[in-house]
């Protein structure tokens, strides 16, 4: 059965390139905070701490939180890129990651060559790669540009190719970062229906996004990340309302009135004064 | 490791005890599955290097030819040696050394230059090492025409002994392992590339590359302490039609075993941390 289980997960990054005396002093003087020292007295940033959750088939988990809250780190840990420093991560199922739009994209290679490479990253057979190639060719609609280096593409063509490519391979467990909702308005509609197919076919979705309506439409559970901790975990509406600090209806109806920007950005009300790491 | 429903399971916990070594071995085994991808990426790296270049791959062939003809004649004169003996020796030495230098230098940046790939999906680290190794072997293969040319011109008669095959295999193995070792060190310490660069320069002069080992009147055995010397000898000597000294093969195997064990232990210890470093 497809599932994700995360127990007592902690991830910390060592700061090797800044182990100066002044940094150590800063760490000693900062009370708590995210800079700590490990057993060997190295300065580390606590990216994730004490994370616990379990996902079953059908779960669509959204991650919300400010910049640097640990959303991307958590996605990468679920993908097995960062291995846990403490605790455990167990993922059962074929993992698909849409974390970096440029995965496998080499600007000097042609669109077609990039498709082949991406298929090989995913470990697909030759026949499957050909299928992906046809699919992407139809979606991206690049015409003869398919056989030209990606460098010569306009930015719109580039988005179409990378998006088509990234969504052509169907996993059970889909881990997605927010860049996916980017792109020009005319493209968005087409992109959205394709992405919805992908999302509906995946057994488990973990999505990190800043867009309230995407979260409300696609997720049935939200985790609010704050400073590497889970601040709140529950049904989408409850968490979104707590996170935004206002009723969800007002946010979503405001979006419907504002046609020029259909994907309204999620900007939370200031919650507390967060110490700015740059002033430390 | 298979669950009843045959879905792949990824279970990650902090490493302890033997898991360090089991997971390092698993990475190598998975790397084999990605061997085709590693080779393709290595090949594409070479192909892309020449897009937009007129002479393309022959730049390397041409520059090796020019260097060997200039240096071969001059140094043969300086060292009072017969050009017909010295020039083939120099050809092999320089080509093999070019390969060693390139492998070591590119080894340092193997993981750091693949940071984007490492951060976007879980993939065996050995795949990146294979990519770099394949690239370096394709580079050295550009020089095959030079070798053939020198063979024909100077009527060199290689000793086609069976040891040539294991020697070549040992080179393939060692180039992979050395790339791996430096890739790990280079990911953690950004000082490694300059250290390696100056090391290569020093070893270029203290290893018999420009000078033949028999110029040393006594104490040739000391040369075996230089890891590059026995490795050069096992490949170069039979190709030039001479027999390899008795102590050379054990030294070459010993150094290779040492390199491999250091690399494996280091990789086992550091594998889980590599993504944090790059």
Image: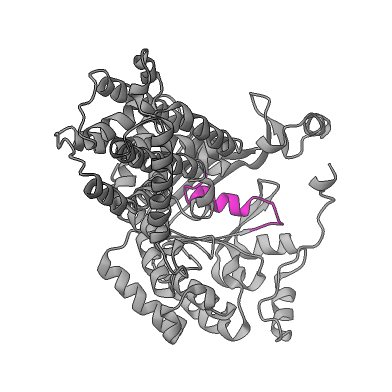
Residue drawn at 60 percent across, 38 percent down: B190
Q: Is residue A94 visible?
A: no
B225 above or below B13? above
Position of A237 with respect to B168 (left or right) is right
Residue A105 painted magenta: no
Instruction: From the viewer's side, name the closer residue of A86 and B236.
Output: B236
Residue A72 painted magenta: yes
Residue drawn at 29 percent across, 54 percent down: B145
In the rendered image, the quadrant that contains the C terminus of chain B is: top right
**Which residue is outermost to the top?**
B218
Instruction: From the viewer's side, name the closer residue of B260 and B65.
Output: B65
Q: How is the image coloured?
A: one colour
Residue B70 lies, in percent from the top left, at 43, 46
Position of A37 with respect to B43 (left or right) is right
Q: For residue B189, what is the image quadrant?
A: top right
Position of A22 with respect to B212 (left or right) is right
Residue drawn at 20 percent across, 36 percent down: B164
Residue B181 lies, in percent from the top left, at 45, 34
Q: Is residue A252 visible?
A: yes
Q: For residue A266, what is the image quadrant?
A: bottom right
B173 above or below B124? above
Residue A208 lies, in percent from the top left, at 59, 61
Position of A186 with respect to A276 (left or right) is left
Instruction: From the viewer's side, name the closer residue of B14 and B213.
Output: B213
- Magenta residues span A64-82
Total label count?
0
In the rendered image, the quadrant that contains the N terminus of chain B is: top left
B253 above or below A18? above
Residue A13 lies, in percent from the top left, at 63, 39
């Amino acid at each position: 059965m497809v599932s994700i289980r995360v127990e007592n997960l902690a991830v910390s990054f060592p700061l090797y390139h800044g182990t100066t005396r002044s940094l150590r002093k800063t760490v000693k003087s900062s009370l708590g905070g995210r800079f700590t020292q490990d057993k060997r007295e190295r300065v580390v940033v606590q990216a994730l701490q004490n994370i616990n959750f379990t996902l079953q088939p059908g779960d669509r988990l959204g991650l919300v939180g400010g910049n640097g809250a640990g959303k991307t780190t958590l996605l990468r840990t679920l993908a097995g890129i960062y291995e846990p420093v403490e605790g455990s991560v167990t993922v059962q199922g074929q993992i698909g990651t849409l974390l970096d739009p440029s995965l496998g994209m080499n600007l000097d290679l042609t669109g077609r060559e990039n498709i082949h490479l991406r298929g090989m990253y995913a470990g697909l057979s030759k026949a499957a790669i050909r299928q992906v190639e046809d699919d992407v060719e139809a979606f991206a609609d690049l015409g003869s540009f398919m056989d030209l280096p990606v460098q010569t593409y306009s930015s719109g063509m580039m988005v179409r190719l990378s998006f088509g490519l990234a969504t052509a391979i169907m996993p059970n467990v889909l881990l997605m970062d927010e860049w996916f909702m980017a792109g020009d308005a005319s493209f968005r509609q087409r992109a959205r229906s394709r992405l919805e197919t992908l999302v509906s076919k995946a057994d488990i979705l973990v999505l990190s996004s800043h867009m309230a309506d995407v979260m409300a439409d696609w997720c049935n559970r939200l985790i609010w990340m704050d400073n590497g901790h889970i601040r709140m975990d529950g049904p989408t509406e409850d968490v979104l309302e707590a996170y935004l600090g206002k009723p969800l209806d007002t946010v979503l109806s405001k979006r419907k009135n504002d046609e020029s920007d259909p994907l309204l950005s999620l900007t939370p009300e200031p919650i507390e004064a967060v110490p700015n790491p740059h002033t430390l | 490791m298979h669950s009843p429903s045959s879905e792949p399971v990824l279970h990650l916990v902090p490493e302890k005890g033997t898991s360090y070594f089991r997971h390092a071995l698993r990475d190598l085994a998975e790397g084999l599955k990605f061997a085709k991808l590693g080779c393709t990426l290595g090949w594409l790296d070479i192909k892309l290097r020449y897009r937009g270049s007129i002479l393309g791959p022959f730049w390397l062939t041409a520059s090796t030819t020019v260097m060997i003809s200039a240096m071969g004649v001059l140094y043969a004169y300086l060292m009072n040696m017969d050009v017909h003996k010295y020039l083939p020796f120099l050809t092999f030495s320089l080509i093999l050394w070019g390969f060693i230098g390139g492998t070591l230098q590119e080894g340092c940046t193997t993981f750091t230059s693949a940071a984007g790939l490492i951060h976007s999906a879980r993939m065996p680290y050995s795949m990146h090492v294979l990519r770099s190794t394949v690239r370096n072997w394709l580079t050295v293969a550009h020089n095959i025409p030079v070798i053939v040319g020198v063979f024909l011109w100077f009527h060199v008669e290689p000793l086609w002994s069976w040891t040539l095959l294991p020697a070549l295999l040992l080179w393939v193995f060692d180039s992979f392992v050395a790339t791996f070792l430096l890739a790990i060190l280079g990911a953690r310490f950004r000082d490694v590339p300059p250290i390696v660069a100056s090391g290569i320069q020093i070893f270029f002069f203290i290893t018999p590359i420009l000078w033949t080992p028999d110029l040393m009147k006594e104490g040739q055995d000391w040369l075996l302490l230089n890891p590059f010397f026995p490795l050069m000898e096992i490949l170069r000597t039979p190709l030039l039609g001479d027999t390899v000294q008795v102590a050379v093969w054990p030294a070459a195997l010993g150094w290779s075993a040492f390199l491999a064990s250091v690399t494996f232990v280091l990789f086992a210890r550091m594998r889980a941390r590599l993504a944090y470093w790059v």
